[in-house]
Every structure is written in C-alpha cells, then in structure tokens.
Image (tube, rainbow, N blue to C red):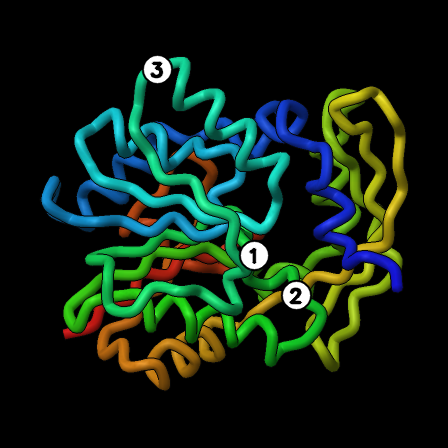
Amino acid sequence: MAKPWYVQLFENYGEKYDQEVFTQGTLGECDFIEAELNQNKDFKILDVGCGTGRHAIELTRRGYQVTGIDFSEAQLRRARVKADQENLAIRFLKHDARNLPFKGEFDAAIMLCEGGFSLMETDEMNYEILKNVAGSLKREAVFILTTLNALYPLSHPLNEFYEGLKSEEIASYDSQNFDVMTLRDFNLVSFTDDDGVKHQIQSNERYYMPSEMTWYLRSLGFDRVEIFGAKIGAYSRADRLSKEDFEMLVVARRG
C-alpha cells in the first residue's frame, strides 16, 4: 500500500522545509501566541505538527516549556539538531496526532501551518486530531490553530495563489481539481528532498468553512471560538477573516 502523500513529502524534507515561504514568520506568530497566553511562562504548551520546531524553539527561548510532536522522524531530527545547537531542552516526540498519549497535561496547544490538521484523507481523521488535542489539554486551556480557509478557493483560482509561491528552492503546487462538494483540493506537489532527489506526488487537502471550525471546537468543549485572517508572521486580532485570506487563524478557549 502506498504511503499517504503527507508521509511521502516529509520523509526527507527537514532542511528544505525551513526554506519554505510559510516558515519565515515565526517571530511575529510567537508574539501573537504570547499575547494570547498573557505571557504566562508557567504554561505548558503542546506544539502539534511541530515540523522542524520553529515555534517550539522560539517559545522556549522566551521561557516557555514546550513539547513538540510530529509524525515525521526527519522533521523531528532537524528540530532536535536546531535545539541542541542552542542548548535548549525541548521534548520532541514522534506521535500521530490522531492518537496522542497525553491526558489533561497542557495549558495550551498550538497547531500552525496545517500541523497535521486538514492533511488527512477523511474528515473523520481530521476531527480525531482536534479531539486528541482537546483531550491533551487541562480543563481551562487555550488552543491556537490555523487551517485552510474554504472562502478563498470558492472565490479565487488556487493556481493563482500557488503561482505566487513558485521558486526552485521550495515545493510547488498545481491544483488539478477543487471539489466544491467536499471542499478538498487535489493537487500535484513537486519538490526536491534534502538529498537533491526530485519528486512529484498527488496531495489531497481539506479546506474549512469558519462555521465548521466553530462547531467542531464547541463540540469538544471549547466555549469561546474566535476566527481571524492568518497573515504569515503577522497574526492579529484586528485581521477580520475574509475571502482574501488563504488561511484562517482560530483561537479557542475552554473554561
């Protein structure tokens, strides 16, 4: 059986991942996270789909205790190297976000840049990620995540957005079909891995409506769900979500 596309992409894509356009806004994104946590350094934070650890490392630099989890050993290996270079003690663990071992352990969770969520093959699998993150949090907690905004492809051709990202140094995307019934984009991903080998794989990503995200999170016990536009490196409560935003930023609170 062929490996899922997201496993194939991240098998050997740690150094290249750090060159992607969407990984360049770490400082501003962590500024927003800190503000949402009221700069409470006692908070234990779970970074879901942590990738090469950019948010976990920056938040640890700022004095927070962070645990990063990811499905890709290559991504985690890169994260550990980066943390070791700065003598930062961070738990980077390999876990499937659909089956997390934590129970009421964390004060906050972040899941940014499609950290697993929206990449799964079915809606049920994506929901399992939200459910497992919710179960990892304490009774009173905050969950900050970004996901793909369905308002965007319903108003714009996705390939116009992808064209603006094209570079020989990073992955490129070619949307083959956006299914308005399932809100899934089937696209061809072309990339060069860390060993210089070129690949092409078929991906399948789910875009979400704001109302869906609100319902999902409220069903998991979050009594306050706020949704904003997600600008790389410039998350802001003043950024009202619109059809011009490729991603949405969700802040959910419980208790």
Left/right placement of residue 28 relative to residue 96 reads: left
**Residue found at x 52% / y 76%:** 127
Please count the marks in the image.
3
Residue 95 visible at all:
yes
Q: What residue is pinned by disc 3?
A: 86
Left/right placement of residue 108 relative to residue 228 reads: left
Amino acid type, label 2: Met
Q: What residue is pinned by disc 1?
A: 116
Callout in the foreground (2, 3)? 3
Q: Counting residues from the N terminus, which is met first, the one under dot 2 or under dot 3? A: 3
Q: CA distance from mark 2 to mark 3?
A: 33 Å
Expressed as whole percent of the image width and height from the top left, the position of residue 52 reads 52, 33
Examine the rendered structure and indicate whether residue 16 appears above or below residue 86: below
Q: In the image shown, does 129 or 253 lie closer to the viewer?
A: 129
Left/right placement of residue 243 relative to residue 233 reads: right
Expressed as whole percent of the image width and height from the top left, the position of residue 157 reads 76, 55
**Residue found at x 43% / y 80%:** 216
Marks 1/3 in contact by CB < 8 Å: the verdict is no
Q: Quadrant of residue 225?
A: bottom left
Give the SS element for disc 1.
loop
Marks 2/1 in contact by CB < 8 Å: the verdict is yes
Expressed as whole percent of the image width and height from the top left, the position of residue 199 reads 88, 36
Label placed on residue 120: 2
